[in-house]
C-alpha cells in the first residue's frame, strides 16, 4: 500500500520531521524541476505539510491538496500560512507553541547585553591595539538606566520582559491587543520607539512592517534596536542607513529580509551584531521542536490531538 504524502517546501524540514518521515512518501519541492507538475501528479496523496511557517501556503496550494489534514509549522511563526483558508477546509494548523520561547528570549538578552555593554566593541578595541594607543574608550550606560521597549508581548516578548526585570531598567510595551501585564502599554509602535533607548522586536512574523523608517528614526542616535521576530517586520534598508549615518547607536539582528542574508550587505555597516536566525536553536529546543513536529505529523497519520492548534 502506498504511503501517505508529506509535502516539504524547504530542505531543512526533512531533518526536522525526524524518523516519522519514514512513514510518508516525501514530496520535496526543491528537488523537483517542475514543482507545479509534481503537485498536480502527487498532490492528491498529500495529507500533511511540514513548513518553517514562512513559506506561502494559501488557497492556491491548499485547493490542490484535496486530502490535506494537517499543516505543521515547526517554529513559533506561521505568517506564511493562510489559516482561515485552511480552517475553512477543516485542515488543522499547528505550530511549536512555547517550545523555544525561553531560548529566543535568552538570545535577545545576549544581543542587548552585547550592544549596551559594548562587548563586541570592547573585544575589538583590545585586539586591535586601540587600548594601548588611545587609552580607555568612552563609558557605556548602565543597564539600569535603559528604557526597554518590547514590541509584541506574546510568549517571547513576555519572557524577554521577565528576564529584563532584574536589570532594574524601565520596561514598556506595545501590541495590537491589550493584555494583563506588569508593564505599561504605550499607544503605538512609534510612541514606544520614541520612549525607548532599547527597542526589542518580538512580535508575530505576519504583522507586516511595523518598524518603519519613522520608527527607526524615533529610536535615535543614542538608541538600539534588537530583532528576534522576523526580518519582514523591520525596514532593513532604514536600519542599515541609520547605522551607517550614525542616526542609530546599534542593532542586534537575528532575522533578516532575505535569509541567508548576503555577507556583503553588512560588510561596511558599523555597530551591528548579527546572528544567523538561531535564537531558538539550542540543543534542548531543537529536541522539543523535533518532538512537537513528530507528534503533529503522527496526528495526520493516526488521528488524535495536536499540541498547539492555531485557531486564527
Image (cartoon, helix red, strand yellow):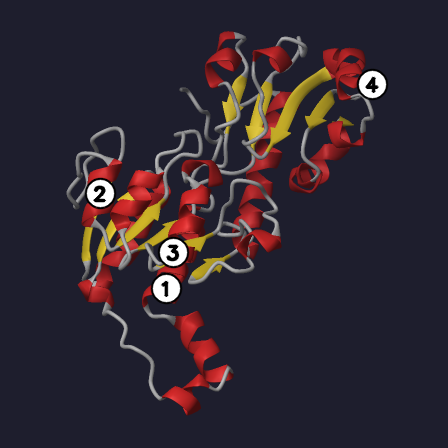
Q: Residue, x 57% and y 28% (percent of image)?
A: 72
Could you say whether the residue bearing mark 3 is in a helix, strand or loop?
loop
Residue position marked by numbered label 2 in the rendering: 192
- Among numbered discs 2 and 1, the one appearing first in the sequence: 1
Q: CA distance from mark 4 to mark 3?
A: 60 Å
- The residue sitting at 27% across, 77% down in the picture is 139
Closest to the observer: 272 or 63? 272
**Camera sees residue 112:** yes
In this rendering, the label closer to the viewer, 4 or 2 = 2
Q: Which quadrant, please, contains the N terminus?
A: top right
**Nearer the observer, disc 1 or disc 4?**
1
Residue at image mark 3 = 245
Sequence order check, earlier mark of 3 and 1: 1
Q: Residues within 10 Å of mark 1 (few under 14, many from 20)?
A: many
Assess whether mark 4 and mark 1 are in contact (beta carbons under 8 angstroms). Answer: no
Question: Residue at left 79%, top 18%?
Answer: 38
Please tell me which residue lies in front, 79 or 253.
253
The answer to whether 166 is drawn above or below residue 26 in the figure is: below
Evaluate if marks 4 and 3 touch, with contact meaning CB atoms under 8 Å apart.
Answer: no
Q: At which x and y percent is residue 223?
A: 28, 56
Of badges 4 and 3, nearer the viewer stands 3
Q: Could you say where residue 119 lies in the image, as x and y percent from the top left?
A: 40, 72
As measured in the structure, the alpha-carbon distance from the residue carrying label 3 to the one carrying label 2 is: 22 Å
What mark, if any, has residue 115 been given in the picture?
Answer: 1
Q: Residues within 10 Å of mark 3 (few under 14, many from 20)?
A: few
Check disc 4 and report the residue beneath it.
2
Would you place residue 137 above or below residue 112 in this image?
A: below
**Which quadrant of the figure has residue 212?**
top left
Amino acid at each position: 500500500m502506498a504511503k501517505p504524502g508529506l509535502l516539504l517546501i524547504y530542505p531543512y524540514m526533512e531533518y526536522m520531521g525526524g524518523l516519522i518521515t519514514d512513514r510518508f512518501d516525501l514530496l520535496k519541492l526543491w528537488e523537483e524541476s517542475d514543482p507545479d507538475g509534481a503537485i498536480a501528479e502527487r498532490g492528491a496523496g498529500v495529507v500533511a505539510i511540514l513548513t518553517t511557517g514562512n513559506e506561502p501556503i494559501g488557497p492556491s496550494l491548499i485547493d490542490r491538496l484535496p486530502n490535506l489534514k494537517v499543516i505543521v509549522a515547526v517554529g513559533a511563526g506561521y505568517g506564511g500560512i493562510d489559516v482561515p483558508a485552511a480552517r475553512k477546509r477543516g485542515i488543522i494548523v499547528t505550530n511549536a507553541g512555547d517550545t523555544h520561547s525561553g531560548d529566543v528570549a535568552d538570545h535577545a538578552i545576549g544581543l542587548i547585553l552585547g550592544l549596551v555593554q559594548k562587548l563586541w566593541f570592547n573585544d575589538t578595541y583590545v585586539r586591535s591595539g586601540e587600548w594601548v594607543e588611545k587609552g580607555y574608550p568612552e563609558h557605556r550606560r548602565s543597564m539600569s538606566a535603559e528604557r526597554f521597549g518590547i514590541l509584541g508581548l506574546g510568549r517571547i516578548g513576555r519572557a524577554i520582559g521577565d528576564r529584563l526585570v532584574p536589570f532594574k531598567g524601565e520596561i514598556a510595551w506595545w501590541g495590537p491587543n491589550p493584555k494583563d501585564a506588569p508593564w505599561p502599554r504605550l499607544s503605538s509602535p512609534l510612541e514606544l520607539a520614541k520612549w525607548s533607548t532599547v527597542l526589542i522586536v518580538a512580535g508575530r512574523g505576519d504583522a507586516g512592517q511595523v518598524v518603519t523608517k519613522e520608527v527607526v528614526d524615533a529610536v535615535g542616535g543614542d538608541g538600539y534596536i534588537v530583532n528576534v521576530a522576523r526580518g519582514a517586520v523591520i525596514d532593513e534598508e532604514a536600519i542599515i542607513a541609520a547605522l551607517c549615518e550614525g542616526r542609530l547607536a546599534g542593532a542586534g539582528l537575528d532575522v533578516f529580509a532575505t535569509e541567508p542574508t548576503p555577507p556583503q550587505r553588512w560588510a561596511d555597516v558599523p555597530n551591528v551584531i548579527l546572528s544567523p536566525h538561531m535564537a531558538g536553536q539550542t540543543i534542548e529546543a531543537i529536541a522539543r521542536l523535533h518532538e512537537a513536529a513528530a507528534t503533529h505529523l503522527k496526528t495526520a497519520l493516526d488521528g488524535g490531538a495536536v499540541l498547539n492548534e492555531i485557531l486564527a
